[in-house]
């Protein structure tokens, strides 16, 4: 085995081991934290969405590890039962924040174990430029039907409406008998008879129509000249048992790419005066310190959805933007309701574009602006399903056929109210990811000043990687009624 092969094997083993360890550890954390007050409900989440439950459990675990190192006073008994004091209550805030965020349902979240963690992408590639394939191309994003065979095609010329004779020499010999086919403008018009003669109704039997299986020399004569610009091709199979052709065998390789996350903090500050704290405490409204910490954490959870959707929309604009005119009269429909039934076909067509583009994928999730969501609800296959989420921020709105739909408020930097961000999501294959968000933990710091007020910051440490931008598409619905 050469050095390159050993490196590929080592990377494959590292990839498989990494994924296996993460899944096993995640399941253990779900089981462990699910038995505590912090992780209450984790096991229920795991029944419907195991990966989301593992992400929540990882977030709690990383936060606990950070806090233990920082304060060195967090005992298991405190973690399990007591959140009256800060920083211990941060664990519950993190648990709720991750659970309530929809980012991992729309895109992919990768729990980080360090600031220099990585995700592995496996590329299966063609290793030779043969039979239409180019070395280095991904095999699951290209179609080269003859690459794993000895069959190939070669041009004999192009029709001009006058030429009837075409001659050439086949490049890879010897040629296997009974495998020669002549194509004109995409149609088979001649075959070899095994003794070197090419026969076919479109060929002039009074002229020479031969193939030399050893030298590859070929000549054909048409009765009627091929039309202008019509390609004339010969298709054949070369002898794979001849040692001179061993270099013409196609092979595939595996390239494992390690994408490193460079996690960095996204801070948000807070401050309050002692007088405000006393006012809240003496009126029985609560602890201002804990309330502010939780408010900051909630803002992080909400903003992470907005950042992800806004970034996804930016990435989607690399691809063709599709428009759907909601004016039913222009479309020749009898009503707005009947025309709205066409929106799913449009989305399915976009899924077909994804499938044709990279030979896999469709549309599995959607994020709709407010007016776009109202229009989607007119479809007969719409089913409201909030998943128990309140209607604030980015929330799960329902399903359009088998597409999970989320709603998002309008913002010029996030999504417009007439837009639908369409994505394909398949967490079971690392090649089928659009955007991956790596989240490490939350950190906090604060100071109390002698002027009787307190200032602090809470930061989420994360990073993002674009894996396959073609899985993201933007649909704009025009002429929506006011």
Image (cartoon, grey):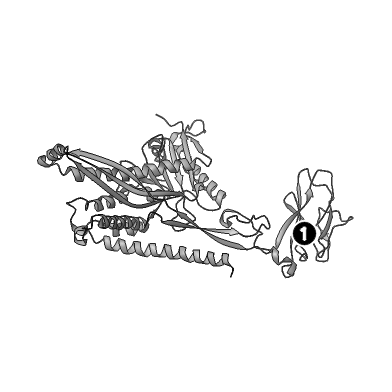
Mark 1 lies on residue = 171
Residue 120 horizontal side relative to residue 33, left or right = right
In the displayed structure, 240 sits above or below 51; it is: below
Element type at mark 1: loop
Front-most of residues 467 and 71: 71
User: Farthest residue toward the top?
Assistant: 482
Instruction: Identify the image quadrant of residue 378.
Output: top left
User: Farthest residue toward the right?
Assistant: 206
Instruction: Identify the image quadrant of residue 129.
Output: bottom right
Tell me, yes or no, if residue 364 can be seen here.
Answer: no
Quarter in which the C terminus is drawn: top left
Residue 416 horizontal side relative to residue 12, left or right = left
Residue 409: percent from the left, percent from the top?
36, 37
Residue 422 horizontal side relative to residue 174, left or right = left
Residue 296: percent from the left, percent from the top?
27, 43
Front-most of residues 74 and 375: 74
């Amino acid at each position: 085995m050469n050095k390159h092969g050993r490196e590929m094997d080592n990377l494959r083993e590292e990839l498989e081991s990494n994924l296996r360890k993460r899944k096993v550890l995640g399941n253990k954390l779900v089981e462990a934290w699910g038995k505590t007050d912090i992780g209450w409900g984790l096991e229920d989440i795991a029944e419907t969405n195991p990966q989301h439950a593992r992400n929540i459990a990882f977030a709690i675990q990383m936060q606990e590890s950070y806090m233990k190192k920082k304060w060195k006073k967090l005992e298991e008994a405190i973690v399990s039962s007591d959140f009256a004091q800060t920083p211990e209550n941060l664990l519950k805030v993190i648990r709720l924040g991750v659970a309530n965020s929809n980012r991992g349902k729309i895109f992919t979240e990768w729990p980080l174990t360090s600031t220099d963690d990585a995700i592995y992408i496996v590329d299966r590639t063609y290793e030779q430029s043969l039979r239409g394939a180019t070395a280095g191309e991904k095999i699951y994003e290209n179609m080269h039907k003859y690459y794993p065979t000895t069959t190939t095609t070669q041009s004999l010329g192009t029709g001009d409406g006058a030429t009837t004779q075409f001659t050439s020499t086949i490049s890879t010999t010897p040629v296997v008998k009974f495998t020669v086919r002549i194509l004109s403008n995409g149609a088979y018009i001649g075959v070899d008879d095994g003794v070197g003669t090419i026969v076919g109704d479109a060929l002039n039997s009074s002229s020479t129509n031969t193939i030399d299986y050893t030298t590859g020399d070929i000549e054909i004569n048409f009765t009627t000249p091929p039309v202008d610009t019509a390609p004339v091709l010969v298709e054949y199979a070369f002898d794979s048992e001849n040692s001179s052709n061993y270099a013409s065998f196609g092979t595939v390789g595996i390239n494992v790419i390690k994408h490193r996350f460079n996690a960095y903090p996204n801070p948000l500050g807070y401050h309050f005066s002692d007088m405000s704290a006393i006012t809240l405490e003496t009126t029985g409204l609560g602890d201002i310190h804990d309330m502010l910490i939780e408010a900051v954490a909630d803002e992080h959870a909400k903003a992470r959805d907005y950042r992800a959707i806004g970034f996804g929309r930016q990435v989607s604009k690399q691809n063709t933007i599709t428009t759907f005119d909601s004016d039913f009269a222009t479309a020749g429909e009898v009503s707005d309701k009947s025309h709205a039934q066409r929106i799913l076909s449009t989305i399915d067509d976009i899924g077909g574009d994804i499938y044709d583009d990279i030979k896999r994928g469709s549309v599995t999730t959607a994020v709709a602006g407010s007016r776009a969501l109202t229009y989607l609800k007119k479809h007969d296959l719409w089913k409201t399903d909030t998943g128990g989420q309140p209607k604030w921020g980015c929330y799960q709105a329902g399903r359009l056929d088998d597409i999970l739909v989320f709603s998002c408020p309008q913002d010029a930097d996030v999504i417009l109210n007439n837009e639908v961000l369409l994505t394909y999501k398949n967490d079971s294959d690392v090649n089928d990811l659009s955007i991956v968000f790596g989240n490490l933990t939350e950190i906090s710091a604060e100071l109390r000043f002698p002027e009787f007020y307190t200032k602090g910051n809470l930061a989420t440490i994360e990073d993002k990687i674009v894996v396959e931008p073609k899985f993201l598409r933007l649909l704009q619905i025009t002429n929506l009624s006011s």
